[in-house]
Amino acid sequence: MTKQQHTAFTAPHYAASTVGNDILQRGGTAIEAMVAAAASIAVEYPHMNGLGGDGFWLISEPGKAPVAIDACGTAAGLADSDFYQGLDAIPSRGGKAALTMAGAVAGWQKALEISANWQSSMPLQDLLATAISQANWGIEVTQSMSDASFKTFDELAGDEHFAQFLIKGKALKKGKIVKLTKLANTLQRLAGNGLNDFYHGDIARELAADLEAAGSPIRLSDFNQYQAKVVTPLSVSTSKGKLYNLPAPTQGIASLIILALYDRVVSQGSSDADMVHLLIECTKQAFIKRNEYLTDPGRLSVELDSFLTDKALDEMATAIKLDKALPWPQEAKLGDTIWMGACDNEGRMVSYIQSLYWEYGSGVVSPQTGIVWNNRGTSFSLTPGHLQQLKPGLKPFHTLNPAFAELNDGRRISYGTMGGEGQPQTQAALFSRYVYHNQPLDKAIALGRWLLGRTWGDQSHNLKVERDLNEYVGEDLLARGHDMVVVDACNELMGHAGAVVLHTDDTTEAATDPRSDGKAFAQAYTATGEVQ
């Protein structure tokens, strides 16, 4: 009898999901599938992520503790107060905004090294082939990409190198086709020469020259010195299982605090409104700690896992009231990114995030490579003594935080979302609905959501609730004192969430967000490749 193998893949763009699923069905590892999908989505969703951005990995091998990869960039050697003399803040666009190294490609390389220890590697050419074809033949503009194009047009359209993201000098409309031939050529060179070319070869030299010409402080030495790092994830145990997320400089600590606190207070609730209210109040406690302490790993004043002790969590839980909202706001964190999840036929799972920060990042496009550079460095401050004060070699605050959980009942879950300030909140919503309240996985993601804080350039710090959720919890939340506004249902503002679940019988389950252009695959197939 031929043994069935079970795999799963989910991404916020169907093309990336398709290529990831294809690699899995060809016997590739979850890591190889994720690299192929990461290259594909860098092409298909260029407003949200790309080779000029950052990445964070959570990788789980059955029977072993998960490992994480920190592939976020550090500030350039020249990125100091002298470089920004005369400015009160780091610009959000242009060369001066492009001040941190791009770590995503180094993260691909580091992850593939782990994959090579599992089994014989697929050729890099095979992993990047679909992305190369997509960039050459052209991508279809989605509504998300069109919205980003119109939103950023006034800021970015004047740069001649940004023209590859316009059609005849005009903003992109849904359904149009955009060819990214320079990016295709760059991907082809990486496939032929190896990913290390990004940091030590011709591509590195071209990027360094283009960035310097654009006014960036990044130089070739910054490329040569950069390395992605394998790090130990943060974790916390709850009544449901063990949860994992990324350490500093990400807000992974906030995501873990929210769910650990909810585990303590969930018994107080008896309604949908109670669930939403309690999760919002848990979020406030987590964000207070995050904003006060989170910074580059090298200058943390406390060990972040000290906030995950029973004593610390019990103390935070006492500040949560079922009938009353804590006054808000606190400082908000922005961000724009993609999350993807995978499970291969050996039960190895990946939770991965890749980002440029804002839509189209800094807006700086390398004319020789077609790569858009991130603006993550705008999270730094130019104020002396600030927790996020800019210094060469340090990492800025990151909203990015892919999540993973091992439940007591044996299920393993890879989950996450894009959405900046909303990432920990959306993670908490989908996880609590699925794990605590037994909602089906797709419904746990699709149901109406909320966002506390500011995102995508919005200046308000209030609570934003989707219309369908407002219909049955809105009045109750207002009565508890929440400063609340209602937004359209199925709103991209709430992020693009997804999840992959491996059950104890080796069957897989996957879901993607109706707010995205994504697709989820959860399939059983025979060793011959026949899908069941």
Image: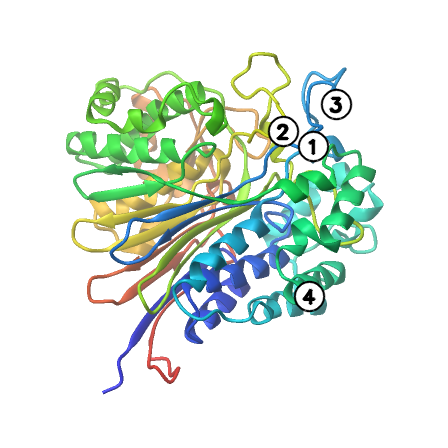
Tell me the quarter of the picture where residue 319 sits. Answer: top left
Q: Amino acid at mark 1?
A: Ala
How far apart marks 4 and 3 lie (CA) works out to: 35 Å
Mark 3: which secondary structure? loop
> Relative to 274, does residue 195 appear above or below in the rendering?
below
Give the quadrant of the C terminus: bottom left
How far apart marks 1 and 4 lie (CA) works out to: 28 Å
Residue at the disc numbered 3: 83
**CB contact under 8 Å: marks 4 and 3:** no
The residue nearer to you, when weighing 15 against 75, is: 75
The residue nearer to you, when weighing 180 against 269, is: 180
Mark 1, other Cα within 10 Å: few <14 / some 14–19 / many ≥20: many
**CB contact under 8 Å: marks 4 and 2:** no
For residue 378, which numbered disc appears in the image? Answer: 2
Q: Amino acid at mark 4?
A: Gln
For residue 97, which numbered disc appears in the image? Answer: 1
Q: Earlier in the sequence, mark 3 or mark 1?
A: 3
